[in-house]
Amino acid sequence: MAPSSAGRTLTAAAAVLTLSAAAGCGGFGGGGSDPGDGGATAWALTGGSEEAFRTSFASWNEANPDREISVEWFANDAYKEKIRTAVGSGNAPTLVFNWSGGTLADYAQSGQVQDLSGQVDGVTDKLLPSVAANAEVGGEVYAVPNNQAQPVVLYYTEEVLADAGVEPPETFADMLEAVDALKDEDVVPIALAGQSVWPELMWIQYLTDRVGGPEAFQRILDGEEGAWSDPAVIEAATAISDLVEAGAFGDGFASVDADSGADTALLHTGKAGMLLQGSWVYPNMVSDAPEFVEDGLGYTTFPEVEDGSGDPSNIVGNPANFWSVSSDASEEDRQTAVDYINDQVYSEENVQSLLDLGAVPPVTGLEEEIAEQDDPAHLEFTYGMVRDAGHFQLSWDQALPPDQAQELLSNLDLLFLGELTPEEFGAAMDSTL
């Protein structure tokens, strides 16, 4: 999944920003980003919500000229390694942009970021519960969401499904029946960017959760022996094997690339019936195929699994990106960072900036504001998914420690290629615990 991708766009405008800014990084504000230079600092990503972040920092700096925050901007891939190195060496910016999950837990447990419990209640009290939980480690708050929620959605082509005589699947059995019907129409039933591998995570996550609920993955996070061979995981892996054997993803899914938009292109050109992807792909489709989006694109939640114990309202994806506060910053700069979070994150101005970008802030009570946006249907749908979710599970390759996450991607790819059985997949992953 594109889990580490705040740089994945949520609007067509943001997509333009990504192209113009992704060539590297650039400074913004009143000085360098070295914590030793004095003054609070922040590192953030180009693209995505960049415009809203820039507006937020500009507002803070204008109102607080004696406590300006200097910001440095990075393309997504360049940032990930740089921030890990900076935090580990004690040279992190005051405000640390991150994805929560395993990385946040490491930062918190090693004392590299501050416990913010009781200091940012003005922000956390606004949050949708399914998102707020991802900012905690051991029951304490070590981060604050700072941009949009990005759930994974089942998109479909209305005309292709209608021609095949099928409805959007409500159960996994419905999905298997739809696969057969769509194959009869000589279209790829479900587009999948297998070359990129991370889109395959969405399938194992949703299926595991629908079968066994979030408890199944929690056992993995807790490092329980044999947790990857839990019946819920094996049943989910078996469902994936069943889909592959049924031809659900076509013959060439292993050569389809997500970063180039090849999976979404299969959908909007009528060559595929369905696509499981993050809501970050929607604006790209608006840009690439506006007529299709206006009159032809459908979207729904992931199907239930018959006899599964998971809540069908549960969702997976990116609850948001997050700010943490570096423990290596001076007391004065840490206070500046906390004050900035309370003053700017999900303020009325910041919420409107995100909505104007087509992004869905994970805060309560936004129904009226969303309804006033141009073409609010997709915003309303994704906001409703997040608002009503019983649980919002972070992308597994962010939730897990980095080494285990890489092994997961490798073994999951082999499962989809038919080179590992479900049981072999579970055993291979058990060895990483």
Image (cartoon, grey):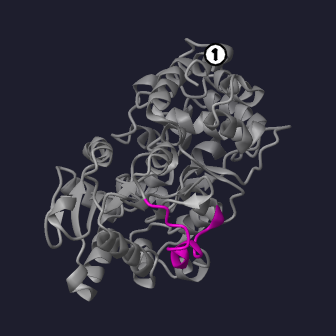
Q: Which residues are magenta?
A: 114-129
* Vertical position of residue 127 compared to residue 75: above or below: below
The picture quadrant where one finds residue 406 is top left
Q: Main secondary structure of the magenta part?
A: loop
Q: Position of residue 300 (x, y in %)?
A: 64, 53
Q: Position of residue 66 (x, y in %)?
A: 21, 84
Residue located 21% across and 85% down the image: 65
Residue located 60% across and 54% down the image: 299
The residue singled out by tag 1 in the image is 427
Q: Residue 429 vs residue 271: left or right?
A: right
Q: Nearer the viewer, residue 348 or 157?
A: 348
Residue located 50% across and 54% down the image: 279
* Vertical position of residue 48 compared to residue 157: above or below: below
Can residue 423 be seen in the rendering of this structure?
A: yes
Q: Outermost residue, right direction?
A: 307
264 inside magenta stretch: no
Q: Residue 208 vs residue 293: left or right?
A: right
Which SS class for mark 1? helix
Within 10 Å of disc 1 (Cα), the crowding (few <14, some 14-19, many 20+) is: some
Q: Position of residue 360 (x, y in %)?
A: 50, 67
The picture quadrant where one finds residue 92 is bottom left
Residue located 27% across and 71% down the image: 54
* Vertical position of residue 27 compared to residue 429: above or below: below
Q: Amino acid at mark 1?
A: Ala
* Vertical position of residue 233 compared to residue 30: above or below: above
125 inside magenta stretch: yes
Q: Nearer the viewer, residue 49 or 10?
A: 49
